[in-house]
């Protein structure tokens, strides 16, 4: 149960002074979610995004243009609007005059706010219009009493429609007043090392800043709270991991016979990274602790073969294996890769998707339940209730972040003591791996299989598209196969993005029926037919959306054109480029961009031209975009940090991890003095589900 000390923080935000039911609904929209309305805690952790510095109090003549100034002046004239024009008020001091401009304002309200002859302080942006200084809609108009109450540095919050800055600032001040006296959960050493204030003091300084620097995400107040959040997350991960390690696995040694046959059937030598990862996984499977491991590898690094050898070890031990992929295209691709190698070792492989005919499905399910099928490959259809295994021993989950972290263990419930191997083709930066997958062991494949060709990557302006098409015509004449990727499916009046359907029509004018089309809105059978036509060489140029981003393997494809490359994320561009260069022929990637390019887009294209190292690209992607998008727009089940930003605070992760490990080594149940304080931290950052594992024993 949550400690009663924290109850004031979990009260609804609508109970705060000045909020009430009507404004409370706006706070719910901004800060609540499906499981709860906005609470006092949510208001406290909704930190300002910037600030307005009202300490700058120059004369009218000295007021800098384009900056906020707070100016003392006398009201000298009202100029009511002509027709639909604005209401203007002239104010002056001894150094000059300033026109205050109000659009669609009530004349009576302005006359009351700015009575002629009175002195007022006006605060806002000073600009020049028609050679005169003006301030359009001042942020504040106050007398001397109002000035005394005006915060010198005013926080600026993220809002939702209908909610105003002053309302949020007032709610934050009221929430601070409800913050109970909390004990310190960090040790003295960490506080001294960071030069940090207490948790409550840091919140106070961020909501009521004295200077703009107080709000810097890299400043001491924000960093203190970021560390608290990272520590709570690392504690939760460690508790989950400890629970996993107490769940007894089943030793799956195997005799190596099936693995030998599969290795003999491989048309290539394994890389050093593949051999090392296979050894790590094999040792884990042979132990009596449940395996929860992430296999991450760059595009084309050979993850599927590693996974197949892990599955073979489990099958040698008398059990079955399942491989689940997020899309049907990817499931079919895995099936096509695995089946010939598995059959060479005498193994039966079945494909299960949502499109199987009833009679086929029935036969497959019977074979699975009897143990006649050794490996099941499929989409999320694998976790449906009617699917039962005779003895599932390993669940391989590909592109597992697309399923959400909570779902990664659903397939494992289809058997007893099932080991889990998750795979991702998106190399994950070190800080993200620690944050998102800290409860998993990690094996990495950095080397590419021998024979893989480097990809010649070029950025070309979309204005030169005719030259590109002419070049493709020559390439197709020489037998090349080409991908052309567009960001949208069909054209829209609101968007200048190339659309796949429109682009396919354009290219058919040049290449006729040699142009194919595949996108996510097509029916599954039509997608398969389009992919098969391209893989078989019936079509030579495949226009596609990002549906081909992961897993599609056509070694004969040697040219990738990505239209509007500036609109894609760096990791996504790298994934798309990885669809070529998979055979022995020379390959190229053309990044078609529409100018003018912003700094970030320019940096992205430059990095892609410089390197094919997916791990370096992932680090750069994190630097350029922040962690929210690197794994795809906030995956369900991802940590979803409220305060910590891994692009800024990633360096704190290691210290937070070490602190969490130390705390749990000294007090595994968190029942001692510091342990009880750390429990408060877990509740504040809502990681308390990890505490339920302690109670579950």
Image (cartoon, rainbow, N blue to C red):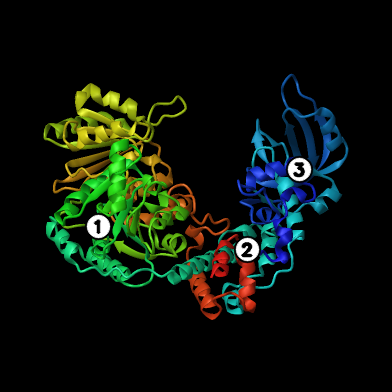
Q: Nearer the viewer, residue 157 or 499?
A: 499
Mark 3 surroundings within 10 Å by alpha-carbon count, few (fewer than 14), some (14 through 19), many (20 or more): some
* Disc 1 target residue: 308
* Disc 3 target residue: 21
Q: Is residue 137 visible?
A: yes
Dot 3 falls on a residue whose secondary structure is: helix
Q: Is residue 190 above or below residue 296?
A: below
Q: Nearer the viewer, residue 11 or 367?
A: 367
Q: Is residue 51 above or below residue 696?
A: above
Q: Quadrant of residue 693?
A: bottom right
* Disc 2 target residue: 683
Dot 1 falls on a residue whose secondary structure is: helix
User: Horizontal and vertical percent for residue 548?
Assistant: 30, 41
Mark 1 surroundings within 10 Å by alpha-carbon count, few (fewer than 14), some (14 through 19), many (20 or more): many
Mark closer to the observer (1, 2): 1
Quadrant that contains the N terminus: bottom right
Q: Quadrant of residue 311?
A: bottom left
Lower sequence index among marks 3 and 2: 3
Mark 2 surroundings within 10 Å by alpha-carbon count, few (fewer than 14), some (14 through 19), many (20 or more): some
Lower sequence index among marks 1 and 2: 1
**Residue drawn at 40 percent across, 26 percent down:** 491
How far is the residue under mark 3 from the one under mark 2?
26 Å
User: Horizontal and vertical percent for residue 61?
Assistant: 71, 44
Dot 2 falls on a residue whose secondary structure is: helix
How far is the residue under mark 3 from the one under mark 1?
57 Å
User: Horizontal and vertical percent for residue 326?
Assistant: 37, 46
How far is the residue under mark 1 from the one under mark 2?
41 Å
């Amino acid at each position: 149960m949550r400690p009663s000390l924290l109850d004031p923080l979990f009260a609804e935000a609508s109970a705060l002074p000045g909020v009430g039911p009507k404004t409370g609904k706006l706070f719910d929209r901004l800060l609540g979610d499906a499981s709860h309305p906005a609470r006092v805690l949510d208001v406290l952790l909704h930190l300002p995004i910037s600030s307005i510095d009202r300490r700058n109090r120059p004369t009218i003549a000295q007021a800098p243009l384009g900056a906020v100034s707070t100016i003392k002046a006398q009201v000298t004239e009202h100029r009511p609007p002509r027709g639909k024009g604005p209401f203007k008020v002239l104010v002056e001091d001894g150094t000059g005059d300033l026109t205050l401009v109000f659009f669609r304002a009530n004349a009576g309200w302005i006359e009351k706010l700015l009575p002629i002859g009175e002195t007022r302080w006006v605060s806002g942006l000073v600009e020049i219009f028609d050679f005169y200084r003006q301030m359009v809609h001042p942020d504040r108009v106050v007398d001397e009493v109002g000035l005394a109450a005006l915060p010198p540095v005013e926080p600026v919050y993220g809002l939702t429609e209908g909610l105003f800055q002053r309302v949020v600032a007032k709610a934050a001040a009221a929430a601070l007043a409800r913050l109970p006296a909390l004990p310190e959960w960090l040790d003295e050493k960490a506080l001294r090392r960071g030069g940090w204030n207490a948790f409550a003091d840091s919140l106070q300084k961020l909501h009521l800043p004295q200077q703009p620097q107080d709000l810097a995400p890299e400043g001491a107040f924000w960093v203190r709270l970021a560390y608290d959040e990272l520590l709570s997350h690392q504690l939760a991960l460690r508790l989950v991991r400890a629970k996993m390690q107490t769940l007894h696995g089943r030793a799956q040694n195997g005799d190596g016979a099936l693995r030998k046959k599969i290795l003999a059937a491989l048309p290539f030598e394994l890389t050093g990274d593949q051999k090392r990862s296979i050894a790590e996984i094999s040792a884990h499977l042979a132990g009596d602790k449940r395996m929860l491991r992430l296999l991450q590898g760059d595009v084309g690094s050979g993850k599927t073969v590693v996974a197949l050898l892990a599955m073979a070890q489990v099958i040698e031990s008398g059990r079955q294996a399942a491989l689940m992929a997020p899309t049907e295209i990817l499931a079919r691709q895995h099936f096509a890769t695995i089946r010939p190698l598995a059959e060479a070792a005498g193994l039966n492989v079945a494909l299960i998707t949502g499109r199987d005919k009833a009679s086929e499905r029935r036969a497959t399910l019977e074979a699975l339940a009897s143990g006649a099928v050794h490996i099941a490959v499929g989409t999320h259809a694998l976790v449906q209730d009617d699917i039962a295994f005779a003895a599932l021993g390993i669940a391989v989950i590909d592109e597992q972040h697309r399923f959400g972290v909570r779902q990664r263990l659903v397939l494992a419930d289809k058997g007893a003591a099932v080991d889990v191997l998750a795979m991702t083709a998106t190399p994950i930066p070190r800080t993200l791996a620690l944050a998102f997958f800290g409860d998993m062991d990690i094996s990495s494949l950095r080397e590419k299989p021998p024979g893989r060709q480097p990809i010649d990557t070029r950025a070309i302006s979309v204005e030169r598209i005719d030259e590109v098409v002419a070049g493709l015509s020559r390439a197709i004449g020489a037998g090349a196969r080409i991908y052309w990727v567009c960001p949208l499916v069909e054209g829209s009046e609101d968007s200048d993005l190339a659309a796949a359907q429109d682009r396919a029509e354009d290219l058919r004018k040049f290449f006729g029926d040699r142009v194919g089309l595949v996108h996510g809105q097509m029916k599954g059978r039509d997608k398969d037919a389009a992919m098969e036509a391209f893989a078989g060489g019936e079509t030579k140029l495949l226009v596609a959306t990002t549906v081909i981003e992961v897993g599609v393997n056509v070694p004969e494809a040697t040219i990738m054109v990505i239209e509007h490359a500036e609109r894609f994320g760096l990791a996504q561009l790298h994934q798309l480029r990885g669809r070529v260069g998979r055979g022995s022929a020379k390959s190229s990637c053309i990044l078609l961009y529409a100018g003018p390019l912003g700094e970030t887009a320019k940096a992205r294209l430059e990095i892609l031209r410089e390197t094919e190292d997916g791990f370096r690209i992932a680090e750069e992607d994190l630097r350029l975009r922040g962690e929210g998008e690197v794994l795809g727009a906030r995956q369900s089940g991802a940590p979803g940090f409220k305060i910590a930003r891994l692009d800024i605070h990633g360096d704190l992760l290691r210290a937070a991890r070490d602190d969490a490990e130390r705390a749990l080594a000294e007090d595994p149940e968190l029942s001692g003095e510091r342990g009880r304080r750390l429990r408060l931290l877990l509740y504040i950052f809502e990681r308390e589900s990890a505490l339920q594992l302690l109670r579950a024993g």
